[in-house]
Amino acid sequence: MSPIAVECTNRGRHERSVNGVEDVKNPVRLGLYGCGNRTRALLNSLRGENEYQVVAAYDICGQAVASAVEQYGGKSCTSSKELIAHDEAEAFLISLDPFAHPAAFDEAVEARRPIFIEKPIAMSAQEAWKMWKKAERLDVPVQVGFIRRFTPEQMAARAYLINNPPGRIFGVSCNWFHPGETEMINCLNNWPENFRLKVSQIPFHCCHALDVLRTYCGEVKTVHAVGVKWVDRPYPSPDKVVADFVFENSSVGAFHYSSMSYKHEISYVLHAENYTLTFDDGLEIWHRPQYQSLRNDGSPDCRDTYHKHIGPDRFHFGASSVDATIMLKFLRSVRDGLPMDPGMEDGYRVAELAEAIETSWRTGERIDLPLTL
């Protein structure tokens, strides 16, 4: 079986038994800082797996706390201080309005226990920097909720890169298109004060894509972006932005965003010396023909033979719970004392990159990284 096939077969699985005997583990005792939909999705992804136990919960909305405690158990806390002081909590899960993340993190990190914090860790690079450095100073392990690097196609692609030398990687790009009007109308109809009507999607939601791009080419050193915001509506995201990157390894990249697209698309292309990877409804691998005879068959026109052996190899994946993947990774890191990845440096680097894109398209200037804060 090829390395890509092995990865496709094993994607997202975790062994729970050895020789038919269940591998019993002590559940990690969690304190919930925020009891909204995202917290519930993460917890529900491992329902019945005995991986965690909720021992305490706090949310600014008392009804949300009561509902969470009824469903997951634990103590209903009336203040964040009460939650942080709860002795039984081994680790904290923070998932709030992103504008509230820095203050909540600043409280929780003082307890010096492991933390899972949802993305984005902050809505500004400066706040994200302070959070990263405080966690580093207090030696607190933190995992950030960048789930899209754990989709089956991304995990399979990284396994393929490890097992099949790509040669030089020239660059990677992403298209992120969506009809922003749908989110705007839905929020105005149901939650007119929702933070989604106050933030650009580039730092808030597209941070997933910026994280994925970094997994292939590393850190960005320069950003230049152009964009337009012509449509007058209560939705802060730009109508269209095209950002070009130069990475520290001298490869290049691009991020193309539109909130005025009537086609949903989140796709990626990676160009390397020996193959091209494309991600759009699965994973496709396009090869440089392996043998000289397939690249130049000696005929007057070698193109037909060459193109026949390019591919692609196509891999399609069924449903996979990336929430379960990242939660399990966090809980086992807490239990076994393993490094957490993606961590707070990743959270900061993505916030920095998002801010550079937003600044560049608004000013028309090239932005050099790292930012001077």
Image (cartoon, helix red, strand yellow):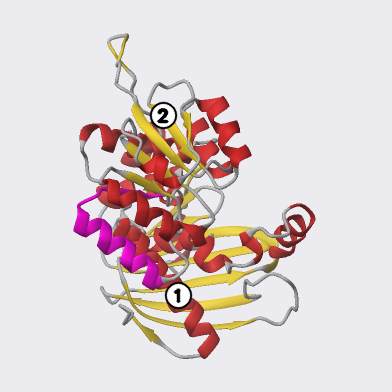
179 relative to 64, above or below: below
242 relative to 57, above or below: below
Q: Residue at x 55, y 47 (%)?
A: 60
Q: Amino acid at mark 2?
A: Val
Q: Residue at x 39, y 65 (%)?
A: 350
- Residue 74 % position (x, y): 46, 27
Circle 1 or circle 2, nearest the eye: 2
270 and 47: which is toward the camera: 47
200 and 286: which is toward the camera: 200
Q: Quadrant of the C terminus?
A: bottom left
156 and 165: which is toward the camera: 156
169 relative to 143, above or below: below
Task: State which quadrant residue 220 falls in.
Answer: bottom left
**Mark 1 nearby-residue class (10 Å; few <14, some 14–19, many ≥20):** some
- Residue 54 % position (x, y): 43, 29
Would you say 244 lies left or right of 182 here?
Answer: left
Task: State which quadrant residue 348 falls in.
Answer: bottom left
* Whole-number angstrom distance, CA of label 1 to CA of label 2: 37 Å
Q: Quadrant of the N terminus?
A: top left
Q: Residue at x 31, y 40 (%)?
A: 3
**Is disc 1 placed on a helix, strand or loop?**
helix
Q: Is residue 121 among the parts visible in the rendering? A: no
The magenta stretch spans which residues? 125-144
Q: Amino acid at mark 1?
A: Glu
Residue 137 in the magenta stretch? The answer is yes
Residue 81 in the magenta stretch? The answer is no
Magenta stretch secondary structure, dominant: helix
Residue 55 disc label = 2
The residue under label 1 is: 355
Q: Is residue 330 among the parts visible in the rendering? A: yes
